[in-house]
Amino acid sequence: MKILFQGDSITDAGRDRNDPHNLGAGYPKYTAELIKQAYPTMEFEFIDLGISGNRTENLVERLQPDFIDIQPDVVSILIGVNDTWHFYGSGIKCPHDYYESNYRKVLTELKEKTNAKIILLEQFLLSVPDKDHFRDDLDPKMQITRKLAREFADVYVPLDGLFAAASIKKAPTHWAADGVHPTAEGAKFIAEHYLNAFKEMI
């Protein structure tokens, strides 16, 4: 079974981009470990093509070589926080309808040109003082992600809500020091919920 991880820096996680099978130090690494433990008799090929800084428009740009040509059995996508962050950080605006059209194109092409099962991972923001204002732009985009998940996904992992619940007992910075990029504990947390979604899907 060929499993493709796609997204931005959270998926990239410092991977060696010369080796698509290198899973970096983030949730793809921990997810692969958990899946192999859960299904010891199955053979898996794990591919990580997340690229730091990517937005939804970048996924459209690399749709053919990094999605379609791979022909994965399972593809997971975690994207969207940069469509918000780059607006506040660099003034690069991503209107909500543009965000939706980009994401919809990726998902439509996957449905039409592959047989992949689709796992959508919700973009998330943990509560840290310097980014709480991101919510004004992030939350409407998150609703779009959820709408697209209902249309296209085989399973959805609601990470924003899951992290919010986890942050009741442990500080948000335990999971992501800057509110966005997971610590090792945050990456393991994502991996655990990814595994649950994977089990539900297959």
Image (cartoon, helix red, strand yellow):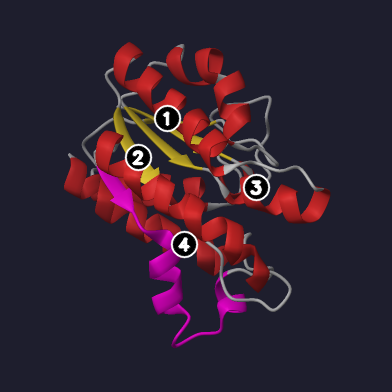
Disc 1 + disc 3, Cβ < 8 Å: no
Tell me where residue 177 appears, x and y as whole percent. 67, 71
Specify few, some or many for label 1: CA neighbours under 10 Å numbering under 14, 14-19, or 20 or more.
many
Disc 4 + disc 1, Cβ < 8 Å: no
- The residue mark sitting in front, 3 or 4, is 3
Three-letter code, disc 2: Leu
Question: What is the CA distance from the residue labelled 3 to the residue labelled 2?
Answer: 18 Å
Res 82 label: 3
Question: What is the CA distance from the residue labelled 3 to the residue labelled 4?
Answer: 22 Å
Looking at the image, residue 50 lies above or below residue 179: above
Residue identifier under label 2: 148
- The residue mark sitting in front, 4 or 1, is 1
Res 104 label: 1
Question: What is the CA distance from the residue labelled 1 to the residue labelled 3?
Answer: 17 Å
Looking at the image, residue 138 lies above or below residue 112: below
Residue identifier under label 4: 188
* Pick the front one: 85 or 34: 85
Looking at the image, residue 200 lies above or below residue 2: below
Specify few, some or many for label 2: CA neighbours under 10 Å numbering under 14, 14-19, or 20 or more.
some
Three-letter code, disc 3: Asn
Specify few, some or many for label 3: CA neighbours under 10 Å numbering under 14, 14-19, or 20 or more.
many
Tell me where residue 17 appears, x and y as whole percent. 67, 29
